[in-house]
Amino acid sequence: MSLLKNAASLLCLASVVTTVSAVSAVAIPADAAGAPASSCFAAPDASAVATVRGRTLSTLHAYDGKVFYGYGDYDANTGSSSTPQGTNVSYFDPATNDFKVAFPHFKAEEVNTFRTLSDGKLYVPNIDPSLGARATNGYATDAEGQWADVGSGINSIHVFDVARVGQEVFVAGAHQPVAGRDAKEQYRAVVWRSVDGGRTFTESLVDTNADVTRRTGFERFYWLAVLDGKVHARADTNNGSPLMRFDPAVGAWEAAPGVTEPDFGRWIYDAHDVISWKGRIWTAGVTGLRWYDGTTTGRVSLPRTTAGPRNVAVGTDGHLYILDTASRVWRMTQTSVSQEVDPVPFREAVAAAEGLLDESRTALASAEAADEAARQQLGSATDQHGASLRSAGDADGAVVEARTDLDAARATLAGRRTAREEARTALDVAHTRATEADAAVTSAEADFSVLERVGSQARTKVATALAAQVAAAAAAVEAEEVQGDRTEQLSSATSRRDAASVALRDARAATAAAQERVAALQKKSSLHAAKAKQVRTKIASLRKSMSTAKNRAQRLSFRTELATQLQQLARTNAARAATAKALTEALAEVRQARSQEQAAVKELSARERDVTAATADLAAAQGAAREARKAADSAAAAHRAAQDEQRTAEAALASGRRVLDDAAARAAAVRTHVAAAGTALATAEQELSSAGAATTRAEAVLAERTTAAAAARAAVEQADAALRDATTAAATARARLEEVAQQVEAAQKGLAVARERLTAAETTTGRPPVVSYTLSSKALVELGDASAVTVADGKLWYSKGNGDATLCVQPLTK
C-alpha cells in the first residue's frame, strides 16, 4: 500500500496546473512485453499467517542493501494468535538470497510501515500491539545500534508513523482510553514528541471531535511527513481537521498554509502511502497521487489509464516509483536548475572594503592622539603607582582578617557535626526502644487472648456443674417423697381402706392442680431457653467481631460487651435451673397425685398386698434417698469448685487487661520520644547546613581578598611598565600616520570596484530555478498481480498480491 500511495502522490504532481513546475511526458523504452524474467522467493514467516491479508507483503523498503517487507493482519490480530506472539521485522538479503529476521516477535499484530529517518536509521511503528506487548506502545528501531522496542510515555492504542527532525522524534496515533472512565470522553488523535532522541515522549498535538456523541473511537493521526525541516500531520476525526505543521525552531503547531485542496491528506489509512520526496509531500490514496510543497497543493494523473496508485516508493537511485491498481510500474524524476548569481560573496567584498577604510581612518585619528595620550599617561602612571602600593597594604590586612573569620567558622562547623552525630545516635536508640515496646504490646495481646479462652472454658464448666446439681437435687427430693409415700402407705394402709373414696376425689383434684402448674412452668422454661439462645448468638458475633477488629480500641470495646453478655447468660442459666427444679417438683406432684389416685382405686381390693409391697418399697426408697442425697452433695461440691475456678480465671483476665493497657501506654510514650528525637536530628541538620554555608562564605571571602591582594601587587608592576612604554608611543604614532594614509587611498579604490560587481549580481536575485517533475509516458513493466514495489541497486523488487507471501526481483528497465 505504501507504493500505491506514493504513486497517487506522483499523479497529483502530473496534474498540477499552478505556478509550480508542470509534468512533462518522457518516453522510457520498456513495457510489459519486453520485461525481463523475475526471480521469486517465498517469505517463510509471512507464509505461516492464516489470513490472506496477513500473508500479503503489503510494503517493501530498501535499507542497508537489504529489502525489508511488511506482513500480518491487525484486523484478525494474527500477531496475538501466533506462537510466540508478535510479528517479525524481516528482510531479504540479496547477497545471500535468503530471508532473515532483524527483530523477532515484535509485539505487533502487523508490520505495515518502514521509515528511514534523518539519522539514517530504520524505524517500524507498532500500528496495533499484540498480546504480550508492554503498557506503552511505540516503535521498533535500530537507532542505538541494536533493535529495540521504544516508547516510554506513549499512552497509545495505535502508533501509525514515526518522523524525526534533528534530535526530536515524533510519533502519530491514537490515545489509549483508561479503564473505568467513559471511553468516548477519551477518544482522541495524538502526536507525541520527544526532545531527547526518543527516550521519553509527551503529548504534542491532540485532535478530536468537539461533539462527544459523534466520536467513534477511530480518531487517529495516520501519517507524518517532514518538509523543509517541519513536521506535517492531519488527523482523521470526522471533524474536518486541517493539515497541521510543527516548526522545531518555534516549538508550536500551526495550520499549514496554501492547502488549496481541502481534502489533501485525508482518507490515508496506511502511513507508507505518504512520502516526502524532492521538496514535496506525496500521498497515494483513493483520491489519486497528490502533493503539497508548503505553498500549494496539486495532483498527478497516470497517462492514458484509469488506474489509480496502489503503492509508491523512493528508489535508491533517487527516483519515485509508482505501482498502480493494474500492477503497472511508473517512474518519476525531478530536476532543478538555478538562474540566480549568489550576491553574498560580493556583499562580503564590499563590507570588507568598507571595514578596511574605516579601520584606516580610525588608525589615523588614533596616531594623532597617541603622543598627547602618552604624556598624560606618564603622570597618570606615577599617581597610579603610589595608589597601587597603598591598595596592596590594605589588601594584605583584609586577607589576615578573612583568615581569622574562616578559622572561627570552621570551629563552629566541627561543633555542629558533633551535635548532628549525637542526635542521630539518640534517634537510633529511640527506634530500638519503640521496636521493643511494640513487641511487648504484641506479647500482651497474645497472653490476653489465652486468658479469655480460659475464662470462657471456666464459665462453661460452671454452667455444666449447675445443671448437674439441679438434676441431683431434684432426684433427691423425688426419692425422699417416694420414701414418705411408702412410710405413709405402710402406716395407714388399714385406715385408707375406709377413706379410699375420699382419697380418690382428693387425688384427682391434686392431679389437675399439678398439671396446671407443670404447664405454667414449661412455658416459663421455654422463654428462658429462647433468651439464652439470643445471648449465645450475640456472644458468638462479638467474638467474631473482636477477631477482625482493626485496632486495639475496638478490641477492648468488644471485650467489655462480651463480658456483659456472659454475665447475662449466667443469670439466664440460673433462672432456667430454678425453673427446672420447680418443674421437677411439679412433675413429682403430678406423679404422686396419680399414684394416690391409682392407690385409692385399688386400696380396698389390695390392702394386704399394699402392706407387703409398701414394706419392700419403703426399704428400697430409703436406700434410693440415701444415694440421691450423696449425689446431690457431690454435685454441689463440684459446682462450688467450678465457681472458684471461674473467679480465678476472671481475676487473671482483669490482670491481663491491665498488663495490655500498660504495654500500649509505654509504646505510645516511646513513639512520642522517637518523634522528638527526629525533630532534634532535623534541627541539628539545619544548624550543620547553616554552619557549612557560613564556612563556605568565609572561604570565598578569603579567596576573594587573596586575589585582590595579588591584583594590587600586579597593578604596581603594570604601572612601572606603563611609565616606560609611554615615552616611545609618540614616535610610533607619527610613523603609523603616513602608513595609514596610503592604506586609506587603496581601500577607497577597492570599495568602488566591489560595489560595481555587487550591483551586477543583485540584478539576478529572484529569478526562480527551473524545476521539473517528469513522469514516464509508458509503464516500465506490467507485473500481473503485485501489492508493493521498491527499487534498490538497479533492480525492481515487488511482492505478489492475494496472500501469496512471495517476493520477486528483476533487472530495472533503463
Image (spheres, rainbow, N blue to C red):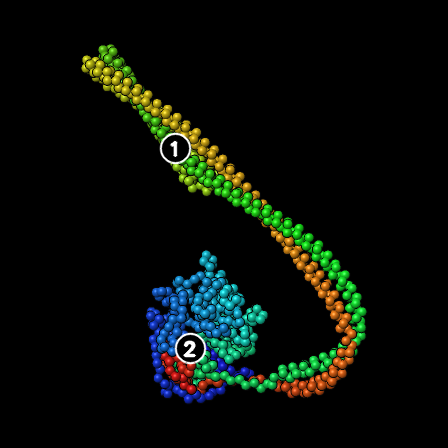
In the rendering, at what x and y percent does residue 243 appear?
52, 72
Residue closest to the eye, 445 or 625: 445
The residue drawn where x is 51% and y is 74% is 226
In the rendering, at what x and y percent does residue 413 appear?
62, 50
Q: Is residue 56 visible?
A: no
Q: Which mark is residue 65?
A: 2
In the rendering, at what x and y percent does residue 434 appear?
50, 42
In the rendering, at what x and y percent does residue 23 appear?
49, 85
Q: Secondary structure at mark 1?
A: helix
- The quarter of the image holding the N terminus is bottom left
Q: Secondary structure at mark 2?
A: loop
* Residue 626 falls left or right of residue 605: right
Q: How many marks?
A: 2
The residue drawn where x is 43% and y is 31% is 652
Q: Which mark is residue 496?
A: none
The residue drawn where x is 67% and y is 81% is 352
Q: Is residue 475 visible?
A: yes
Q: Earlier in the sequence, mark 1 or mark 2?
A: 2
* Residue 64 falls left or right of residue 804: right
Image quarter for residue 592? top left
**Disc 1/disc 2 C-alpha distance (Å):** 86 Å
Q: Which residue bears the numbered disc 1?
A: 454
Kind of residue at disc 2: Gly
Kind of residue at disc 1: Val
* Residue 579 falls left or right of residue 270: left
Give yes or no for contact between labels 1 and 2 (Cβ–Cβ under 8 Å). no
- The quarter of the image holding the C terminus is bottom left
